[in-house]
Image (tube, grey):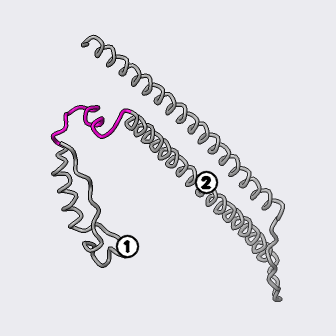
Amino acid sequence: MSTPPICTPDIAELHPDETSGNRKFACHHDIKLLLQITFASPWEADHGKHASLRKSGTAEEYEEREHLLQDIKTRMDDFKASETIRQDVCRGKLEGIENSGTLLRKMTLGELERSSQEEAGTQKRKKRKATAPSIDMNNLIHAIQAGIDDKHRREELITEQSAARLEFDREQAAIRAEQHHANQLMMMKLISAIAKRIE
């Protein structure tokens, strides 16, 4: 039984909001899809992994479909891996900012405590102008630079690990493709040998 072609909806059948760029599936689209499935009767196809797949196209189409599916899966896995790397980089940046802010606060509070202890020790009656706390800029710059260097080391490590994972995934995909191709060739040889015996 041949499957009837899938029909596209006529412009007259579209609802007013569907003629714009905002198209949505409506109930009548579901009805047309169910009618198409009823005519196609996919449940009548032979059961079996390859029998039902081969009904839809030639062996070349099947192989191309398998290769495209493997490529898509590899790219999706790579995107997920890079997503965790991007999240780690963002998290590292935020930690670096928080660490430098915490360090600056601690240094400032330390200076304020020392100046308040000195004022309590001298206890002069006259009013003094409040002086800005002195911050050891060299220590601050050194601490910030150490945080930046640590962040760069972590980013380089993550980049190396993701490159190694990507290379491994590519090698595994190539091995699977070669095995699939070898299996297909073996099946074709087996089928041709059986066909020769039958003749």
Three-letter amino acid code at the position of disc 1? Asn
Residue 182 lies, with reference to residue 34, above or below; the image says above
**Where residue 130 sits: x, y (%)?**
79, 83
Residue 174 lies, with reference to residue 189, above or below; the image says below
Q: Earlier in the sequence, mark 1 or mark 2?
A: 1
* Depth check, front residue: 140 or 199: 199
Looking at the rendering, which quadrant does residue 111 occupy? bottom right
- Position of the C terminus, as image quadrant, is top left
Does residue 82 show up magenta in the picture? no
Does residue 58 show up magenta in the picture? yes
Q: CA distance from mark 1 to mark 2?
A: 37 Å
Residue ranking furthest to the bottom? 126
**Mark 1, other Cα within 10 Å: few <14 / some 14–19 / many ≥20:** few
Which residues fall within the magenta stretch? 43-59
* Depth check, front residue: 6 or 68: 6
- Identity of the residue drawn at 40% across and 40% down: 65
Return the residue at label 2.
89
Looking at the rendering, which quadrant does residue 114 occupy? bottom right
* Depth check, front residue: 87 or 123: 87
State how many labels appear.
2
Residue 116 lies, with reference to residue 79, above or below; the image says below
Return the residue at label 1.
22
